[in-house]
Image (tube, rainbow, N blue to C red):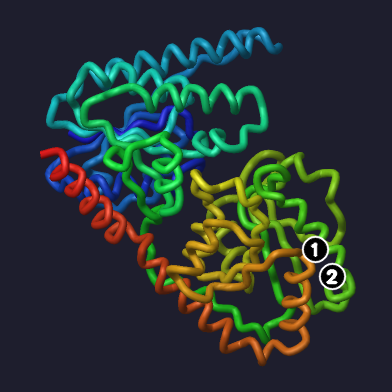
Amino acid sequence: MLHFIDQTSEDKHHMVFNASMISILLSLYPDQMLTAYGIASNHVSIYSLLTAAEKKRVVFSTIEYTKPARNGLFYKALNYIKKEKTRMRQMDSIVTGAAAEDLIFYSVSSFYCFYYFKKIKTKYPVPVIATLHGGIDYFYNPQSYMERINAWYHKRMFKLDAPNFKYLLLNKIAKSKLVKDGYLKAGEVMEIEHPYPNLGAVQTFVPLTQTPLTIAHLGSMEAQRKHSHYLYDLAARSAASIQGGKLKFQIIGLKNASVKNWENEWVEEVVGKATSYLERSVYEQAVKSIHYSIFFFPVNEYICRASGATVDTLVFEKPVFTLYHPYFEYLFKVAGNVGYMVNTLDEMKAIINQIIADPGRYEAEYRLQCDNLKQFKNKLTVESVAEDLRSQMNTLSNSMN
């Protein structure tokens, strides 16, 4: 039996990763059924991405949470404690009820419940693969008290010795850093590209000669962790080209309050209402219509966490404009020319102006960038990631014998 745990994702949050990993696990264990534990709305989203054959092998077990009895911080805090206890009871049930030959895949929960999960796992032999998400970034750049607490629990968890417990990272740049800095041992962590389900032929090529040149920020806008507000700065510097119909900057996804102070009229918004993401079909159609995606990640962010926006730019074969960042240095190294990586916004603006002035001159390079992304995204298929994970699991298993 396979067990898949995501106790906190709602609706479409983590739907692509969860569906992909469920497909991968079913591929690796073709004779096994899988029980997915989580919130009903997320299960609906996951279900929509599975094949008909996979749906027959998955049983969804929903977790039910209480709601605050009244408005107010006290009641919200009290309800959070109740939810934590509900999560811990479910983990107790899964771990104690699993057979030694089962496999538990941990996707995500609260940071304390992650620690609790490994703590109870120390007493049981059932194998576990546990995903490391954004909490590891807080080791290096915590920006609040809660992020420091989150990092503290992760560090405490890493020191627990549990049998058959392996971690999984969702990029190929974080493992060496975490091992070098002494947080993890090489033999207890695996690393994969962020998988994506149903990666067929996606027709998204938009010729540079099709105006205006459209460049978009994908996913959620965040000032601190993504420096997303730089988009407004760059757009303001390019106001003449935007007014002239030669250039368009877009936000596709979600705009949050952190960028409100930088908003201006030069950026077009294709966003969900309030705090809601766009419908996935609307989001995908919008991404298909752009020429380039754009990123401004600080160099100390998105090292130990995966970005859904970078996955989307790979899936839809959209070359990038980006400031220098370790992930994109890796991407350019292994995939080749996939866009433009520069030091400053001024350099970005200069390249954009050159493309606008003579798109035909850049068409061949643009096609090469799209083709390189097409080739690299083959590493994101369920089949490719499954084979990579299988190889690493076998290597770690052999090293223990």
Identity of the residue drawn at 72% across and 82% down: 355
Q: Measured from the top left, where is residue 48 in percent x and y?
A: 40, 48
Q: Position of residue 2 (x, y in %)?
A: 22, 35
Residue nearest the viewer, comparing 52 with 364: 364
Residue receiving disc 2: 238
Q: Which residue is mark 1?
A: 234
> Which residue is found at the position 52% from the left and 11% from the top?
81
What amino acid is found at the position of numbered circle 1 in the picture?
Answer: Leu
Q: Residues within 10 Å of mark 2 (few under 14, many from 20)?
A: some
Does residue 171 sit above or below 168 in this rendering? below
Q: Is residue 156 left or right of residue 98?
A: right
| Quadrant the N terminus occupies | top left
CB-based contact (under 8 Å), mark 1 and mark 2: yes
Position of residue 306 in the picture relative to residue 197 (left or right): right
Task: Pinpoint residue 249: horizontal percent, then vertical percent.
Answer: 75, 65
Amino acid type for the residue under numbered disc 2: Ser
- Secondary structure category for the residue under label 1: helix
Q: Residue at x 61, y 71 (%)?
A: 289
Q: CA distance from mark 1 to mark 2?
A: 6 Å
Identify the mark at residue 63; answer none if there is no mark. none
Q: Quadrant of the C terminus?
A: top left
Tell me the quarter of the picture where residue 334 sits: bottom left
Residue farthest toward the left in the current orientation of the protein: 401
User: 19 or 53: which is nearer to us?
Assistant: 19
Tell me the SS state at disc 2. loop
Residue 236 lies, with reference to residue 136, above or below; the image says below
